[in-house]
Image (tube, rainbow, N blue to C red):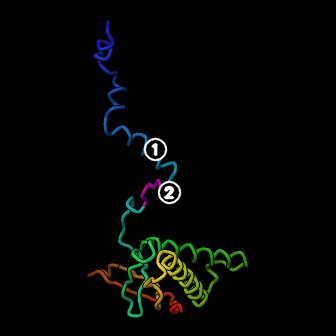
């Protein structure tokens, strides 16, 4: 028998499965469920349970609350702005809890101050990243972190915007 005759043997069912284009999914799905949300793997839980609750996102705006080109200027996406804000907010809440004040015990004024401080830290980070990218960045004017809430009121969708923090122009 020559070499070519041995390659003419039919593949086993496992061999055929390994060559099928869907085979990598048999490996990827269990891995994503075990690893969960650790970059670069994500199991996308946001799509697993759709609901009618409000959606919240954040953007960096100018004095007129019009979005500024954060991605272009700093390389930071809108979703990263929201993640950074939530990170700082959680960090500040945990700091209060270490002092013995649980989140449920915080007054609305305390929560507003935490949100404002987290917002300022986020805006400072965005500005810092933009200046690292380009010294003549457009993000040196006054910046505002705006929270947008989209919700269904029973008849139509509504939008509610709230300014969380304002960062003064840099000199």
- Tell me whether the residue at label 1 lies in contact with that at label 2, contact meaning CB atoms closer than 8 angstroms: no
Residue 99, above or below 64: above
Q: Secondary structure at mark 2?
A: loop
Location of mark 1 (residue):
30
Question: Left or right: where does residue 62 sit relative to residue 85?
Answer: left
Q: Which residue is more in the foreground, 45 or 164?
A: 164
Q: Which residue is more in the foreground, 163 or 66?
A: 66
Residue 33 place in picture, x, y as percent: 47, 49
Q: Residues within 10 Å of mark 2 (few under 14, many from 20)?
A: few
Q: Residue at x 68, y 76 (%)?
A: 95
Secondary structure mostly seen in the magenta stretch: loop
For the record, the magenta segment spans 38-45
Q: Residue at x 36, y 37 (%)?
A: 23
Q: Secondary structure at mark 1?
A: helix
Q: Seen from this angle, which residue lies furthest right?
A: 99
Among numbered discs 1 and 2, the one appearing first in the sequence = 1
Q: Which mark is residue 39?
A: 2
Q: Residues within 10 Å of mark 1 (few under 14, many from 20)?
A: few
Q: Which residue is more in the foreground, 101 or 22?
A: 22
Q: Residue at x 40, y 87 (%)?
A: 161
Residue 110 place in picture, x, y as percent: 61, 87
Give the spatial CA distance, label 1 vs label 2.
Answer: 16 Å
Instruction: Inspect the magenta stretch and tell me whether residue 43 lies in it.
Output: yes
Q: Residue at x 48, y 87 (%)?
A: 140
Question: Left or right: where does residue 87 sit relative to residue 1?
Answer: right
Instruction: Inspect the magenta stretch and tell me whether residue 117 lies in it.
Output: no
């Amino acid at each position: 028998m020559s070499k070519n005759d041995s390659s003419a043997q039919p593949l086993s069912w496992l061999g055929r499965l390994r060559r099928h284009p869907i085979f990598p999914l048999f490996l990827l799905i269990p891995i994503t469920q075990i690893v969960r949300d650790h970059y670069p793997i994500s199991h996308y839980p946001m799509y697993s349970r759709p609901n009618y609750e409000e959606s919240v996102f954040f953007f960096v705006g100018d004095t007129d609350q019009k979005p500024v080109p954060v991605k272009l200027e700093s390389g930071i996406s809108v979703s990263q702005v929201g993640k950074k804000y939530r990170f700082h907010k959680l960090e500040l809440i945990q700091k209060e809890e270490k002092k013995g004040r649980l989140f449920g015990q915080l007054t609305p004024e305390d929560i507003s101050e935490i949100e404002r401080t987290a917002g300022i830290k986020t805006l400072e980070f965005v500005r810092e990243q933009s200046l690292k990218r380009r010294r003549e960045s457009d993000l040196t004017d006054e910046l505002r972190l705006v929270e947008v809430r989209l919700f269904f009121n029973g008849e139509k969708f509504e939008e509610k915007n709230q300014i969380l923090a304002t960062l003064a122009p840099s000199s």
